Amino acid sequence: MKKILETKNLCKSFGAIKVADELNFHVAENEALGIIGPNGAGKTSLFNLITGTIKQDKGNIFYQGESIDHLNVPNRCHQGISRSFQIPQPFGGLSVFENTFVAASHGAGLSTAIANKTCIQILEQTGLLSKANQIANTLTLLERKRLELARALCAKPKILLLDEIAGGLTESECQLLIQTIFAIKDTGISIIWIEHIVHALMSVVDRLTVINFGAKIADGPPKEIMNSKDVKEIYIGIEADA
């Protein structure tokens, strides 16, 4: 499959702390890639590097075969790179619809008419259409997670970065969210999903990458990776032969 996003020898440090250490990884068109690793492994920092929130010290990021190192955050969004945040960050005083409209009109640059239509479609897709006129800061956690997802989708991404979107949900809420992400995957959007709730991740992704201290430890089929010695010792935190 053709690569839609790729990093080459990506490095980023904050003092002595390395959040990207010669990191090479890629995601293909129409692929769902899961990323796991212990707290502080550099997972969210990787998303910040991809979206341009922080600048790498060394290495390159390629999107659709072209370097995007020179592009700022809005330009990367316009190109089709969109993300959710681990802690939902809606505009609390705006309605659900208004939150998505901001993403569609500014993130994707859509005209008012097309933005309105897009927002309605995505609110329906994410199960929020009945909440369209509700103020965002009155939503439940699941609804805020869904709004975070809806806002990212309204930016019309070709690649969607999900940062622990299942965190804090009950098992039933998590299953509903998984169904929604499956539906998104079926539309052909590439997905990179960081998640600590591994069973949710395993039910969706095609491939799994493990990072620790900013370095790639393992990459491959999800079941194979989760059974590997290095992952058990580094990620799960047990000795592999215990």
Image (cartoon, rainbow, N blue to C red):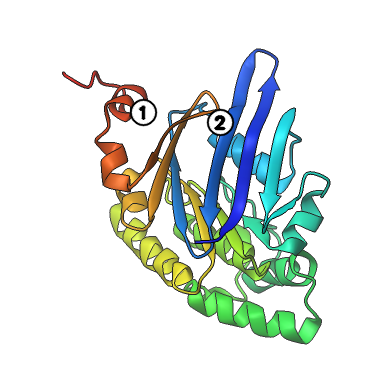
Total count of labels = 2
Q: Which residue is mark 2?
A: 42
Quarter residue 54 falls in = top right
Instruction: Describe residue 106's horizontal placement relative to residue 131 as left or right.
Output: right
Pick the quarter of the image with the C terminus: top left
Task: Please name the residue shown 74% across and 42% down the image.
Answer: 53
Q: Secondary structure at mark 2?
A: loop
Q: Is residue 233 above or below residue 77?
A: above
Which label number is shown at residue 14? none
Instruction: Describe residue 127's horizontal placement relative to residue 53 as left or right.
Output: left
Query: Neighbour class for label 1 at 10 Å: few (<14), some, many (≥20)?
Result: some
Query: Neighbour class for label 2 at 10 Å: few (<14), some, many (≥20)?
Result: many
Whether the residues at callouts 1 and 2 have beta carbons within 8 Å, the answer is: no
Which label number is shown at residue 235? 1
Q: Amino acid at mark 1?
A: Tyr
Q: Secondary structure at mark 1?
A: helix
Q: Residue 117: x, y in percent?
A: 66, 85
Instruction: Describe residue 225's horizontal placement relative to residue 75 as left or right.
Output: left
Task: Please name the residue shown 60% across and 28% down the image.
Answer: 22
Task: Please name the residue shown 44% across and 72% down the image.
Answer: 186
Quarter residue 158 falls in = bottom right
Q: Amino acid at mark 2?
A: Gly
The residue positioned farthest toward the top in the image shown: 16
Q: Front-most of 109 and 60?
A: 60
